[in-house]
Image: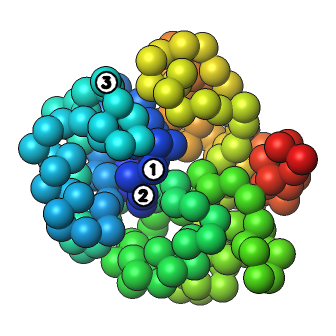
Amino acid sequence: FMTRVTVIGTTSWGTTLGVLLARRSIEVRLWARSSEEADLLQSTRENSRFLPNITLPPSLLVTSDEKEALADTDLVLFAVPSRSLRENVQRVSQAIPESATVVSATKGLERDTGKRMSQVLEEELPVSLKSRIGALSGPNLAQEIAEQKPATTVVACYLGELANQAQKTLMSPTFRVYTSEDVIGVELGGALKNI
């Protein structure tokens, strides 16, 4: 079980994952790209642009400071658009602890290279984190999950024990999490489903 989680990205999915975890009283830090956005979300306690009418729980901190967002974190969830994953990883990678598990919650392939999101993570993260990379994907509609409607997802990590820890951290009464060691299959399933 992971007690501190950092979500990179204030997208509808990133915000939903943060809310889901914070509702379980897990310490969550949601990283925003600008201090203006972080201040707005922190003060209004709502992401009205991407996730209207959902209150951000008290244990969710919004910050644009990557060191504050990633200090002593156990699990890092990247929930940014596929086109900007590489740029976001480059911005925060040096602040990620070596003991953290890093999971892509981004669906899709990198436009110019055709690479999967975990491949982008492998290229941009320090060597010490390469075996600690995973992917989260499933038939997930952010608004429905934030409204606590039943849903399911899969978290895959090359190391099964990390997938099991992430599962225990993410699971809730309405959000069922399965595990896998097939990172490639989970990513391709998520990327190809809309086609």
Q: In the image, 193: left or right of 19?
A: right
Q: Which residue is mark 1?
A: 11
Label 1 to label 2, Cα distance in Å?
A: 6 Å
Residue 53 image label? 3
Packing grade of label 1 (10 A; few <14, some 14-19, many >=20) is some
- In this rendering, is residue 100 above or below 188? below
Q: Position of residue 36 (x, y in %)?
A: 17, 63
CB atoms of marks 1 and 3 within 8 Å: no
Q: Is residue 156 visible?
A: yes
Q: Which residue is mark 2?
A: 9
Going by the numbered disc 1, the residue's amino acid type is Thr
Q: Is residue 75 visible?
A: no
CB atoms of marks 1 and 2 within 8 Å: yes
Q: Residue at x 39, y 72 (%)?
A: 97
Element marked by disc 2: loop
Packing grade of label 2 (10 A; few <14, some 14-19, many >=20) is many
Element marked by disc 3: strand
Location of residue 95 by image quarter: bottom left
Front-lying residue, 169 or 32: 32
Of pointers 2 and 3, the one earlier in the residue sequence: 2
Q: Residue at x 13, y 55 (%)?
A: 39
